């Protein structure tokens, strides 16, 4: 499948993505090796934050290269899915119709009524 967006200038970035991928794989294996027999590795292990950081870097690099669906749409200049937008618009319309049933009548007439003072009564009396 030819996307027509590869450039020679991307080569260093592609190599960097490959290095981060290898580092992430090594960290995953090291983290998994810390698990007790039959158990899961601890999130408190020092390998875990490094693994999360590598995954974040990897995702950022993939988006920069257009290797995620969202980034590819952005590179191609395609808008978000119209089906998804139509569904959202339809749902918001349904909610608006339901809310209209709870709308209050015009209460501006209440602003013209005199305000009567309410005497304060001491409960101890």
Image: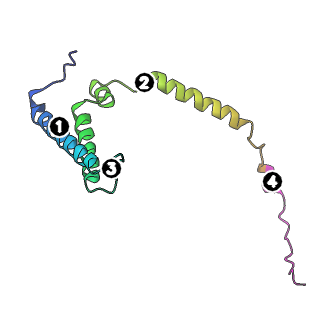
For residue 97, side relative to residue 91 (left or right): right
Verify CB contact (< 8 Å) between mark 1 and mark 3. Answer: no
Label 1, on which residue? 17
> Could you say which is closer to the camera, residue 45 or residue 65?
45
The residue under label 4 is 110
Q: Are marks 3 and 2 in contact (CB under 8 Å)?
A: no
Q: Nearer the viewer, mark 3 or mark 2?
A: 3
- Which quarter of the picture shows residue 62? top left
| Residue displayed at 38% across by 25% down | 79
Res 14 → quadrant: top left
- Disc 1 from disc 3: Cα separation: 26 Å
Q: Residue furthest top?
A: 1
Point out the tag, 2 or 1, that comes first from the N-terminus. Answer: 1
State if disc 2 and disc 4 touch (CB < 8 Å). no
- Cα distance, mark 4 to mark 2? 47 Å
Residue at 28 percent of width and 46 percent of height? 32
Secondary structure under badge 4?
Answer: helix
Query: How far apart in space, not on screen, are marks 4 and 1 (Cα)?
Result: 66 Å
Q: Which mark is residue 41?
A: 3
Q: Which residues are magenta?
A: 109-125
- In reply to whether residue 8 is colored magenta, the answer given is no
Q: Which residue is mark 2?
A: 81
Asked if residue 38 is positioned above or below residue 111 in the image, the reply reads above
Q: Residues within 10 Å of mark 1 (few under 14, many from 20)?
A: some
- Crowding at dot 2, Cα within 10 Å, few <14 / some 14-19 / many 20+, comes out as few
117 to the left or right of 54: right
Measured as percent of width and height from the top left, residue 60 is found at 26, 40
Q: Position of residue 49 (x, y in %)?
A: 28, 53
Extreme residue in the bottom direction: 125
């Amino acid at each position: 499948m030819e996307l027509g967006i590869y450039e020679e200038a991307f080569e260093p970035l592609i190599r960097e993505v490959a290095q981060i991928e290898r580092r992430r794989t090594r960290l995953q294996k090291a983290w998994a090796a810390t698990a007790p027999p039959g158990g899961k590795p601890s999130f408190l292990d020092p390998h875990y934050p490094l693994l999360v950081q590598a995954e974040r870097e990897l995702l950022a690099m993939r988006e920069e290269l257009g290797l995620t669906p969202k980034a590819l749409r952005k590179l191609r200049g395609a808008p978000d899915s119209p089906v998804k937008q139509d569904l959202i618009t339809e749902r918001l319309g349904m909610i608006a119709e339901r809310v209209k049933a709870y709308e209050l009548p015009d209460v501006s007439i209440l602003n013209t009524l005199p305000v009567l003072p309410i005497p304060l009564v001491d409960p101890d009396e």
